[in-house]
Image (cartoon, helix red, strand yellow):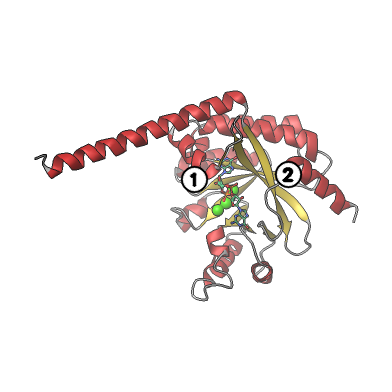
């Protein structure tokens, strides 16, 4: 009779081996995808809640494999972060954004583009050079480029503070993303120079649904105001949520109520048609 401990150990080893194999496969796939240019961007509009105007867009990465299969960013971004591949992905995102701005968004002078950065991007100065090149090759004006960083990305406060200062000295806006879901301590927020606070979808979701929880977004908005940060609410799906946010002084919002993320050509088309109204 095989002892139970041995069976458990064997099972554990099998599972760990499976996970390791799965991760290496995914890492190899990401490397191949970078070589084969399987990534592209879609853009979700940022809407001014007071005027209804589309004032900017967040670039969101998409991975379509050669066989047509789509792999969602929630799956491959964490994997790329683990494997140390995320800075290469960021580099590709910056290339793609440069192309999209030059080919689709150039005519829209009061329109901003936001890019997501990961924690590892704040580990070296490379990102500052990348963003500088992006500005130079697109001719974007101050305020037309925003970077989004999660609290996790900013946890190494000393280094992050220096990189953020360099980024802001290029007149690039800085947003704290998914606010309230990470390790945030208020004290470190006040030590960083930020421009925008993005209210995470999990808080937007509570508006109008959960009476006990829905005072949280109101507190976040009040805090943003005291820190002099502009709020951008994520994941707005109902007019009730949009109205609540607007009434509480939130200026900007994104969400399926307004639009899902769309290809750059479609975004440009929309912006042109809105201009002529
Ligand atoms: P995120 O930065 O919080 O991006 C917002 C996500 O919420 C997007 O999912 C978007 O499609 C989704 N969303 C927007 N509005 C609504 C809504 O009204 N309802 C619902 N249910 N969902 C909404 P997506 O594109 O799947 O991206 C997932 C995450 O992947 C992003 O979350 C971001 O953390 C990461 N990501 C996406 N693109 C990039 C990138 O270029 N670089 C990096 N480092 N991370 C990225
Ligand atoms: Ca984001
Ligand atoms: Ca977000
Ligand atoms: Ca989010």
Quadrant in which residue 163 is drawn: top right
In depth, the one of 221 and 167 nearer the eye is 221
Q: Is residue 211 above or below residue 122?
A: below
Q: Quadrant of the N terminus?
A: top left
Seen in the picture, residue 230 relative to 268 is either above or below; the reply is below
Q: Position of residue 191 (x, y in %)?
A: 51, 51
Q: Which residue sits at x=58%, y=64%?
A: 204
Q: Please state which of residues 122 and 87 is positioned toward the viewer in this rendering.
A: 87
Q: Is residue 132 visible?
A: no
Q: What is the number of the mark on residue 15?
A: none
Please identify the residue farthest to the right as the structure is shown. Answer: 276
Q: Residues within 10 Å of mark 1 (few under 14, many from 20)?
A: many
- According to the image, label 1 marks what residue? 154
SS at mark 2 in the image: loop
Label 2 residue near ligand 2, CB within 8 Å: no
Disc 2: CA contacts within 10 A as few (<14), some (14-19) or many (>=20): many
Q: Position of 260 compared to 28: left or right?
A: right
- Residue ID at (74%, 36%): 100
Q: Residue furthest top?
A: 35
Taking depth in this image into account, of 246 and 29 the one nearest to the observer is: 29
Q: Residue at coordinates 64% horizontally, 68% vertically from top-left? A: 241
Please name the residue shown 31% across and 33% down the image. Answer: 17
Asked if marks 2 and 1 touch (Cβ < 8 Å), the reply is no
CB at disc 1 and ligand 2 closer than 8 Å: no
Would residue 91 be visible to someone looking at this image? Answer: yes
**From this viewpoint, which residue is outermost toward the front?**
1
Q: Nearer the viewer, residue 4 or 91?
A: 4
Q: Residue 185, image x and y in percent?
A: 45, 56
Image coordinates of residue 239 in percent, x first then y, are 69, 68
Please give the label number shown on residue 144.
2
- Dot 2 or dot 1, earlier in sequence: 2
Looking at the rendered structure, the secondary structure element under dot 1 is helix
């Amino acid at each position: 009779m095989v002892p139970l401990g041995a069976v458990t150990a064997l099972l554990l080893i099998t599972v760990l081996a499976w996970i390791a194999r799965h991760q290496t496969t995914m890492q190899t796939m990401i490397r191949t995808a970078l070589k084969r240019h399987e990534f592209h961007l879609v853009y979700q509009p940022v809407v001014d809640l007071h005027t209804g105007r589309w004032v900017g867009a967040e670039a969101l990465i998409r991975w379509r494999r050669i066989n047509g299969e789509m792999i969602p960013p929630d799956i491959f971004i964490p994997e790329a972060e683990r494997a140390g591949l995320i800075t290469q992905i960021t580099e590709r995102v910056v290339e793609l954004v440069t192309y999209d701005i030059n080919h689709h968004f150039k005519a829209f002078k009061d329109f901003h583009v936001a890019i997501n950065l990961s924690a590892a991007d704040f580990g070296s100065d490379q990102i500052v050079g990348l963003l500088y090149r992006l500005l130079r090759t697109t001719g974007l004006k101050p305020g037309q480029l925003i970077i989004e960083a999660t609290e996790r990305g900013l946890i190494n406060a000393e280094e992050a503070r220096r990189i953020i200062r360099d980024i802001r000295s290029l007149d690039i806006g800085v947003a704290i993303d998914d606010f309230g879901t990470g390790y945030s301590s208020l004290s470190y927020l006040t030590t960083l120079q930020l421009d925008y606070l993005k209210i995470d979808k999990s808080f937007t979701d509570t508006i109008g649904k959960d009476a006990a929880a829905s005072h949280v977004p109101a507190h976040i908005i009040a805090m943003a105001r005291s820190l002099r940060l502009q709020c951008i609410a994520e994941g707005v799906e109902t007019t009730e949520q949009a109205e609540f946010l607007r009434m509480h002084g939130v200026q900007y919002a994104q969400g399926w109520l307004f639009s899902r993320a769309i290809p750059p050509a479609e975004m440009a088309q929309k912006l042109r048609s809105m201009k002529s109204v």
